[in-house]
Amino acid sequence: MTTTRPVATKADLEAFIDLAYRLNADDPNWVPPLRAEVRDTLSPKTNGWFSHAEAQLFLAERDGRVVGRISAHVDTLALTMPPEQGFGPGCGQWGMFEAEDAEAAAVLIDTAETWLKGRGLDRALGPISLSIWEQPGLLTQGFDHKPTVMMGHNPPHYRAWIEAAGYAPAKELVTYELGITQDFPPLVQRIVAAGDRNPRIRIRRVDKARFAEEAAIILGILNDAWSDNWGFVPLTPPEIEDVGKKLKPIVFEDLIRIAELDGEPVAFMITLPDLNEVIAPLKGSLLPFGWAKLLLWIRRPRARTMRVPLMGVVKRLQASRIASQLAFMMIEYIRRDAVAKYGAERGEIGWILDDNQGMIAIADTIESKINRRYTIFERSLDA
């Protein structure tokens, strides 16, 4: 018989973290995250998301063994969002989902739902781990290759277990991949060249010496640009501060650009070298020598793949021709530096909402292809 209980002690938390490493050990495409980063994600002291959210972690056990885990959470900011954008009043979430078998999966999801209903919620979305800005969705396409930095990976059979609990797809997120060693198509080159001649446009690198100021500029554009998107929850100052601390070591000035129009910041693009290429062999630990390898890489980063996790253009420009021009200019400038300075050969863009026509058009124009698909599921808790 499978039972569940809340994580209550440090030992429970370690068991919660350890389970993912055990269950995914035989998957060659699962990248073990650094355990210290997982702990930081789960701690209110180091994850600003907890400033407006509450979470409870649960373990599933059978015959004295841990056979599954799940988190249940309620985000007070998500509750204030319009229901047509995915969240809204009465909507809770669950995530951090791992299960040894179908029985454990069923019991875990039921436990998470019971916790959510106990807080007066009547709808559940999952998996979302923990924030929509972290690792949303279940991988449902693209199991044959490793994820890039900050992207999730799970076994294919998790989908059937979630659907057996009564869940249906609510939204799909996709990532696109492309080779970046060759020039983009002539159309893109002409658009970029025209932008280069436009005195109103300036595409600049971020200045790490003014990291807090630059982060505030990007946050302002992001919260405006994404505000009408499905699943949007505004990033708060505590979150951006903690994310900044986490990402600062792998933030490189020539891989993050801010576009200015008539001197005003109106767009940005963040690109990260694929840290997973470095941490995959470390098995989740920086000891005994992993820290030295990571430090050496940070000083002289080389990466085959670059990931674009976020880009945006202020809402007032999104229907204009200049919006796509700014996007293509930032993509091209970063592509050049990524290849020349970091040895990059491949790019990955995403995640992108599967109905984001603007971003899909940009991805198509630079001849990229969908390589991974993530699904967020939903269920009414009144049933």
Image (cartoon, grey):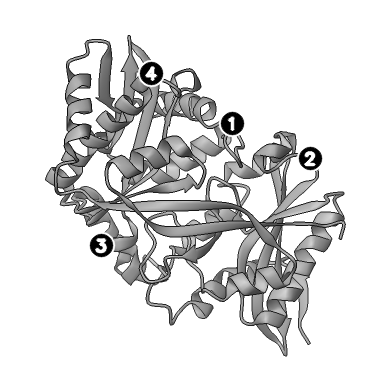
**Label 4–label 1 contact, CB within 8 A:** no
| Residue identifier under label 3 | 293
Name which residue lies at 51% across and 79% down: 22
Q: Please tell me which residue lies in front, 106 or 357.
A: 357
Circle 3 Cα neighbour tier, 10 Å, few/some/many (<14 / 14–19 / ≥20): few
**Is residue 310 something one can see in this rendering?**
no
The quarter of the rendered structure image containing the N terminus is: bottom right
| Residue identifier under label 4 | 265
Badge 2 marks a residue whose secondary structure is loop
- The disc, 2 or 1, on the residue closer to the chain's N-terminal end is 2
Asked which quadrant contains residue 96, the reply is bottom right
- Disc 3 marks a residue whose amino acid type is Lys
Percent position of residue 343, x then y? 15, 52
User: Alpha-carbon distance for marks 2 and 1?
Assistant: 17 Å
Circle 2 Cα neighbour tier, 10 Å, few/some/many (<14 / 14–19 / ≥20): some
Q: Is residue 372 left or right of residue 114?
A: left
Percent position of residue 244, x then y? 44, 39
- Disc 4 marks a residue whose amino acid type is Pro
